[in-house]
Image (tube, helix red, strand yellow):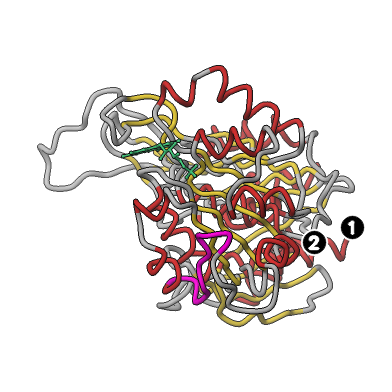
């Protein structure tokens, strides 16, 4: 969440300017206060009224317009900003800032700000790859300006290549990282496991479970935002890959075990939020099994218990597990925390309808080694991830 954070957004004259409306809307939903400055060209692509309605604030286009308050607007906005974001940044605006030109409201305010400036460029591939533009970008990076790099794809002009405005999700993600004041995980490496595993029966079929991976991804994201180096071992999920995180994708419990053990020595903290399958088919059929009979008997054998193995090797690392139970939640979780040598366990009641596996929310109990129980009410998995990370930090 970006409650109370002050974002000043600059919008330039390109086709992707309409996507800036989504960025403003998303920032507002996260509680940020947004002021918008548009270039004159931008106002040809999308109206100031759109941004005024979305931000709830007067939108400035003309540097010399009659002021709506006594303040010198470009200075007051420059000072007010916790972050300055330019979406979508034109070749022209990048060139102006890189060369110290301040001839309109946006370039003047950027020049006057001491806040971090995040630039999300969008332009035709040939423009983007032009050495002059690249030179300007490099120059700005050297001065500490930050970039959400454009994506590869089909552009409005029909060309395919780099220059497409980055996904709104990625822009919001970068803003959240920059605005996160809490960098208490700096210098720490956190390994997080997430999602289910799949255990193959034959080339077509497999056994799996309902884990969505959302809880593990939320923890990985928050740890990254708080300054940690993050290693995410992910089973198959439909979630968007996280940026600036080392992601190792795995399929089976066996793969997850290998990936966890290969990275174990490098980390200080392990959070096992994945749901690796407990059993796998005893025999894998290399040919698709025919449906000739009315019944099919599948023999299963036990998989390695990754969490237990980690508990045996834990040393002075922090080890956190998750328990998903349909009955005797507290008793089973208390047993697990000791049996597996965990620092604490996060217990989910999977019978609850509006929390748990696929939901964006969760309500859990955190149980520590001495049996202490913390009941955490229903909240978003992102908010819960921060609480779990606070708890880990209190043990370090
Ligand atoms: C239809 C159209 C689309 C444009 N799209 C882009 C664009 O995506 N990126 C860009 O850098 N310039 C684009 N331009 C050129 C800019 O609008 C032009 O360089 C303008 O001077 C930029 O002004 P500003 O930087 O003050 O917003 C486009 C121009 C037109 C007419």
Q: Is mark 1 within 8 Å of ligand 1?
A: no
Decide whether residue 72 is among the magenta residues: no
Neighbours of disc 1 within 10 Å: few (<14), some (14-19), many (20+) = few
Q: Which residue occupies 21% across, 29% down?
A: 288
Label 2: which residue?
392
Residue 219, image quadrant: bottom right
* Distance in Å between CA atoms under marks 1 and 2: 7 Å
Q: Are marks 1 and 2 in contact (CB under 8 Å)?
A: yes
Residue 174 lies, with reference to residue 331, above or below; the image says above
Residue 201 is situated, as x and y percent measured from the top left of the image, at: 33, 36
SS majority, magenta: loop
Label 1: which residue?
396
Image quarter where the N terminus lies is: bottom right
Residue 226 lies, with reference to residue 165, above or below; the image says below
Q: In the image, 388: left or right of 209?
A: right
Q: Is mark 2 within 8 Å of ligand 1?
A: no
């Amino acid at each position: 969440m970006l409650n109370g954070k002050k974002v000043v957004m600059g919008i330039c004259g390109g086709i992707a300017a309409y996507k800036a409306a989504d960025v403003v809307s998303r920032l507002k939903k996260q509680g940020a206060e947004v002021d918008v400055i548009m270039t004159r060209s931008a106002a040809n692509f999308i109206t100031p009224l759109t941004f005024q309605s979305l931000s709830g604030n007067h939108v400035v286009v003309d540097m010399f317009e009659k002021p709506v308050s006594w303040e010198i607007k470009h200075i007051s906005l420059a000072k007010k900003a916790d972050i300055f974001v330019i979406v979508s940044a034109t070749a022209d605006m990048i060139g102006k800032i890189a060369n110290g030109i301040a001839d309109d409201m946006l370039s003047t305010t950027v020049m006057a700000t001491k806040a971090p400036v995040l630039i999300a460029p969008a332009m035709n591939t040939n423009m983007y790859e032009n050495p002059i533009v690249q030179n300007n970008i490099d120059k700005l990076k050297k001065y500490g300006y930050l970039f959400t790099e454009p994506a590869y794809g089909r552009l409005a002009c029909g060309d395919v290549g780099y220059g497409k405005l980055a996904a709104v999700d990625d822009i919001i993600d970068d803003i959240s990282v920059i605005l996160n004041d809490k960098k208490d995980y700096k210098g720490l490496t956190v390994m997080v496991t997430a999602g289910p595993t799949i255990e193959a029966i034959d080339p077509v079929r497999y056994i799996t479970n309902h884990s969505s991976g959302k809880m593990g991804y939320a923890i990985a994201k928050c740890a990254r935002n708080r300054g940690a180096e993050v290693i995410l071992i992910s089973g198959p999920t439909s979630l968007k890959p996280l940026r600036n995180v080392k992601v190792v994708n795995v399929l089976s419990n066996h793969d997850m075990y290998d990936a966890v053990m290969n990275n174990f020595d490098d980390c200080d903290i392990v959070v096992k939020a994945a749901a690796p399958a407990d059993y796998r088919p005893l025999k894998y059929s290399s040919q698709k099994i025919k449906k000739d009979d009315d019944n099919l008997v599948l023999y299963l054998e036990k998989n390695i218990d990754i969490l237990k193995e980690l508990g045996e090797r834990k040393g002075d690392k922090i080890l956190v597990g998750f328990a998903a139970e349909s009955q005797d939640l507290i008793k089973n979780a208390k047993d697990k925390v000791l049996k597996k040598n965990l620092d604490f366990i996060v217990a989910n009641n999977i019978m609850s309808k509006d929390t748990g596996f696929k939901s964006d929310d969760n309500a859990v109990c955190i149980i520590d080694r001495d049996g202490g129980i913390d009941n955490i009410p229903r909240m978003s998995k992102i908010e819960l991830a921060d609480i779990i990370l606070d708890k880990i930090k209190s043990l370090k």
